[in-house]
Amino acid sequence: MRTETEAPFWMDTRTRLTLVELAECSGVSEAIVQDLVEYGALTPSGARPGEWAFSAECAVSIRKASRLCNDLELETSAMALVVSFLERIHELEAQVRRLRAQAGGV
């Protein structure tokens, strides 16, 4: 069964999301997104919550971390760590792809 917050959505990597949009897309509250910023797991552009803009890719990491944390009954601070790890994995995978492309592909 799919809830409204779990509905699929389309975005590309250049899409920027506001705090409200990120919360809606990822299925968490705005307060949790603000906590993730406070813990350093997310780094939005903009000075204040009303001006924040996030990469659309953050929504994927938050959704994965949220499911894991709900399953394991983890606190938001642990979720911040999971989001940080998922973002770092994504960066490293992109770097590997770039290096493979430079080396002639594998």
Image (cartoon, helix red, strand yellow):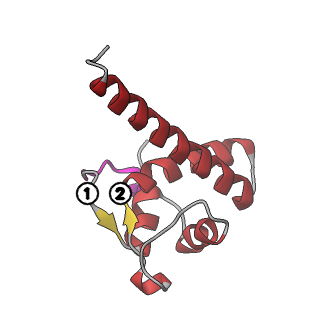
Q: CA distance from mark 1 to mark 2?
A: 7 Å
Quadrant location of the N terminus?
A: top left
> Magenta region, mostly helix, strand or loop?
loop
Identify the amino acid type marked 2. Answer: Ala
Q: How crowded is the residue under tag 1: few (<14 C-alpha within 10 Å), some, or many (20+)?
A: few
- Tell me what residue is drawn at x 49 percent, y 82 percent: 49
Q: Position of residue 11 (x, y in %)?
A: 25, 53
Is there CB contact under 8 Å for labels 1 and 2?
Answer: yes
Dividing the picture into quadrants, the one containing residue 38 is: bottom right
Question: Within the image, what quadrant is residue 52 found in?
Answer: bottom left
Q: Is 6 included in the stretch rendered in magenta? A: yes
Residue 14: numbered disc: 1
**Residue 74 drawn at (x, y percent):** 75, 51
- Would residue 53 appear left or right of 37 to someone viewing this image? left
Q: Which mark is residue 56?
A: 2
How many numbered marks appear?
Answer: 2
Front of the two marks 1 and 2: 1
Residue 63 lies within the magenta run:
no
Which structural element holds mark 2? loop
Image position, residue 73 (x, y; %): 75, 48
Q: Please state which of residues 6 and 64 is positioned toward the viewer in this rendering.
A: 64
Residue under the point 48% across and 58% down: 27
Instruction: Name the image quarter holding the C terminus.
Output: top left
